[in-house]
Image: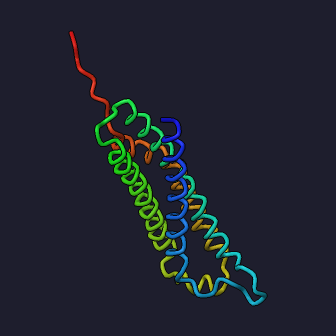
Amino acid sequence: MNSLKLITISVSVILSILLLLSIIHFFTKKFKSRLNNDGRIKVSFGIWYAALFLTGTNIISVVINTVIEVIDSLTKINPANFILQLVKSVSLIIGVGFIWFFVWVFVTKFLIKVIKLKVDEHQEMEDDNFNYFIIKAVMLIGLIFSLSPLLSQLLRPLIPSIELPFYH
């Protein structure tokens, strides 16, 4: 079972990182000008990309800790369709983790609009206004890092439970 645990964790980490990079590409593909006149990456784009990657990897760490608990729980239960239960549980946990990521990125976007009424992100990126993206990145990092224990508690009910008989 140790090899199964190692393989499951490795596959989960690789898939989570690939999914994270795809999601970051989705959030950053709307910025047409990622490079400045010198051909270097703009500071504002680098700050926003780093914030998305940092918060995503924090979510992945919480998800992987929960996946480890799922594997341990399923090995104790030892159901008839072990692999199917493992795949379902791990994919559900990874999915909920990334839905959490989407929610807080959109909450950050909403909070930025509340603070500063009219902001065009494309124009801010074009002007390389890194101060705007620092504020946005700090808000996202603060939200994700401070709410990581809540994500852990949200993922806890998704772990298959061990049924223990009650005897007098």
Residue 165: name its quadrant. Answer: top left
The foreground one among 150 and 132 is 150
Q: Residue at the location (52% across, 81% down)?
A: 119
Image location (x, y in percent) of residue 1: 47, 35
| Residue occupying the far right of the picture | 38
The foreground one among 66 and 149 is 66
Image location (x, y in percent) of residue 77: 33, 31
Image location (x, y in percent) of residue 129: 66, 79
Say how the picture is coloured. rainbow
In the rendered image, the vertical position of residue 117 relative to residue 167, given as above or below: below
Residue 78: name its quadrant. Answer: top left
Q: Residue at the location (60% across, 64% down)?
A: 51
Q: Residue at the location (51% across, 55% down)?
A: 143
Look at the image and tell me whether residue 59 can be seen.
no
Image location (x, y in percent) of residue 95: 39, 57
Look at the image and tell me whether residue 161 can be seen.
yes
Q: Is residue 120 left or right of residue 76?
A: right
| Residue occupying the far bottom of the picture | 37
Q: Residue at the location (36% across, 53% down)?
A: 92
| Residue occupying the far top of the picture | 168
Q: Report the number of discs.
A: 0
Quarter containing the C terminus: top left
In the rendered image, the vertical position of residue 161 relative to residue 6, given as above or below: above
The foreground one among 90 and 52 is 90
